[in-house]
Image (cartoon, rainbow, N blue to C red):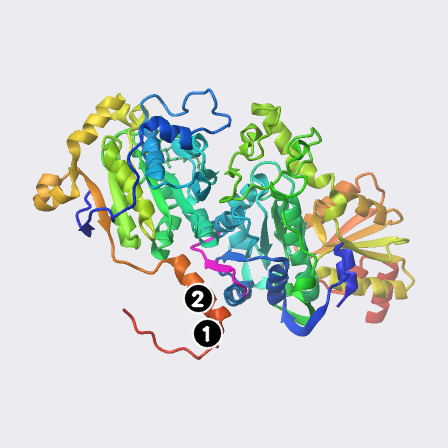
Amino acid sequence: MDLNILERLKLPSEGIRVADRRLLQGNESICEGAIAAGVRFYAGYPITPCTEIAEQMSIRQAAVGGVYLQMEDEVGSIHAVMGASLTGTKSMTATAGPGISLMQDGIGWAQTDEIPALIVNVQRAGPGLGNATRSGQMDIMQARWGPNGDREAIVLSPSTVEESFWLTLKAVNLSERFQTGVITVPEGLVGLMREVVDIPDYDTVPIETRLMPDDEGAADPSRIYDGTMTEIRPFAAVGTEHRSINGNWMRPETDATHGVRMPLTGLSAQDYNIRRLHHKITKRRDEVTFVEEVYTDDAEVLLIAFGTQARTARFAVDQLREKGVKAGLLRLITLFPFPEEIVQRAAANANLVIVPEMNMGQIRGEVTRVLRQHPAEIVGVNHVDSTYIEPDEIMELVPVAARHLEGAAV
Amino acid sequence: MTTIEASPAAAPARKRSAPKPMEETIEFYGNVPNENEGKHFRYCPGCGLGIAQSAIMRAFERLELDPKEIVTVGGSGCYAVMGSYYQASQAHMGHGRAAAMGTAIKLCRPDLTVVTLQGDGDALAIGAQHFVHAARRNIDITVIVFNNFVYGETGGQHGPTTPRETITQTSPYGMVENDFDVVDIALGSGAGYAARTTVYHAQHMVRAIEGAIQHKGFSVVEILQNCHELWGKRNGMPTAPDMLKWYKDNSITAARAAKLEPEDILGKFIIGTWTGPERPELGEEWRKLVDRVQGGEVEAAKRGSGKPPALA
Ligand SMILES: Cc1ncc(C[n+]2csc(CCOP(=O)(O)OP(=O)(O)O)c2C)c(N)n1
Ligand code: SF4
Ligand SMILES: [Mg+2]
């Protein structure tokens, strides 16, 4: 078991027992991570490159006593997921580009109405129908900004099959802790590749469950309103002693479940709640920010990458170091909330920041935004033809290394 | 409204307590500490939704359902606030998605009574796919369709049940599209129970809802509900009594309709209850499957191991 993965994801590793070692497909690894986290409801509509998640879930949910429900479309899928979650059941869906676009309505509801859910977008390439069998990183800003209205979103990106297991588990944990729809964006390449995974004994993994009204301390009125705009309220599931009211996010004074009302009504309640949907996550940024740093301490050339493209970037960093270039890699596991401070710190010594990504510069835009006061040059390497970025293409952008490459070509 | 096929049936035998005065029903189900306290209903004065809501509450009460075991799931429309006027749990969320959410709630909590509150637009335009597929799956939920012929909430535009030639906000010259028959779609999609009633026929409405909730499997109750404000006013029936009288004068029971010639029932509302063939219920089937898988009786099929199906 790669303990670094757990450490990066801030998952305690004590007590976890390895039960098996298997060659798993990324999609399978995602399923198993979800089941280990306690997901007992899956709804989806099949789509490449994540059909294996549906297939695997149809086998596994029956075996673990959960529910597999193949919906009529992705709109139905995300709403079924929310319906299941209203009963307190941990639930998820998986899809790809065209499906994630259809789901935006429901994802917005999950995040706004604070209904825990996991949404997996195994990214294919391209807009519209896209290129089904090709990998891409093009749905990044959509993951943050897809649904209407203003709310914060947690978006995570795995880069290996083993990391997919733990990242999926962590995503479920975070959806429960923050009561929101958490999105993961593994690329088609991660979903379809096979790598060795150490499978833990599921009874020994760290899992979290949403705060419920009968939990200790849940009745504390400050859970409902304390003026800090960070409260995460007890979740009243349907069919319990506590009346569950959903769809009323704007009007917290209707919150009869808790018997406590917010001292706000109307537009001030709306204002408070929209700010709270942001602050409940951004003010606890540490808990949702995960990165991997390689030689960032003294990096003069900083690579910022995510997902599979961080794997080639890592190779480029090693090559650059061999050539005496002080290169470093910041791999973003959390894409949103965007790890602003970490990017700023990692770039402190950099005069060149390179952002390789399989889109036209979605994360580069974020990097440029947070480094707007910084003198470093920020450049992208952008592939949108579904070929993977080669280390040489990154190295060409570094003057010393580029000279070396030219020399080699002669 | 042309439903005369299928089998008009009496609602199934049901356990029922003696009728109570409405005040008691309200005391039990309607005493909700929330933002509605001390405020009037948010429906337009005389709107049929008020009568429909009391019928729903009466049905709950007659079946002696504990409010804690009821979930109403609703979409967007004038009825969306209904859930906040009684004690049961409510999820009133995306427009048209109630049947999808209700299916999942019922699968996870088969012990709960799941009722969706939807409009003609909600259930049969934007949410039609969930409606027909929930019926096909025969999940044990009850879908109530408040059919007022228009999109009331957004100002009275035409919808999938707007009668031909009538005037709405977006059919100012008269509706040129054909309309859906809610009961036909329900039965054709696999519902085992479908009823049509009107807000004039208040007692019938209560029985239709009771029967639907008691029915094991997917059930639909279409309630013809007056929207005199937006539809009536544009079609010669400007007040609630005008429309109630219209329902009264133009409704025929299914039993009577079956004895009449087709031309005699043209343009009439056929009210009654229809039952379709009994089909397996999704939740039960899924739980049986889980038991068999967990008991080791059945394994996931391997590729290429199938046999040709014996098609019924
Ligand atoms: C996705 C979406 N599209 C459009 C709307 C606007 N909208 C709200 S209610 C409604 C129509 C409701 O019609 P119906 O279900 O018949 O209910 P009624 O208001 O007539 O009771 C529409 C179009 C919306 N809320 N959501
Ligand atoms: S607009 Fe029509 S349906 Fe809506 S509340 Fe008013 S009368 Fe009732
Ligand atoms: Mg309507």
Binning the other alpha carbons within 10 Å of mark 1 as few (below 14), some (14 to 19) or many (20 upward) gives few
Query: Can the viewer see residue A383?
Result: no
- Disc 1 is placed on an element classified as loop
Q: Which residues are magenta?
A: A64-74
Ligand 1 within 8 Å of disc 1? The answer is: no
Callout 1: chain: B
Q: Nearer the viewer, residue B248 or A138?
A: B248
- Disc 2 is placed on an element classified as helix
- Residue A73 part of the magenta segment: yes
The quarter of the picture where residue B251 lies is: top left
Q: Which residue is mark 1?
A: B298
- Residue B1 part of the magenta segment: no
Binning the other alpha carbons within 10 Å of mark 2 as few (below 14), some (14 to 19) or many (20 upward) gives some
Is residue A168 left or right of B279 when viewed as pictured?
right
Residue B166 drawn at (x, y percent): 24, 31
Please give the name of the residue rendered at 32% of the width and 38% of the height, measured from the top-left corner: B62
Q: Given contact means CB atoms under 8 Å apart, are the residues at marks 1 and 2 in contact?
A: yes
Residue B176 drawn at (x, y percent): 25, 37
Question: Where is B225 relative to B272, above or below?
Answer: above
Is residue B237 left or right of A195 when viewed as pictured?
left
Query: Can the viewer see residue B19?
Result: yes
Q: Which residue is mark 2?
A: B289
Q: Nearer the viewer, residue A292 or B62?
A: B62
**Identity, as a three-letter code, of the amino acid under mark 1:** Val
Q: CA distance from mark 1 to mark 2?
A: 8 Å
Question: Where is B150 relative to A44, above or below?
Answer: above
Q: Nearer the viewer, residue A206 or B178?
A: A206
**Identity, as a three-letter code, of the amino acid under mark 2:** Leu
The quarter of the picture where residue A27 lies is: bottom right
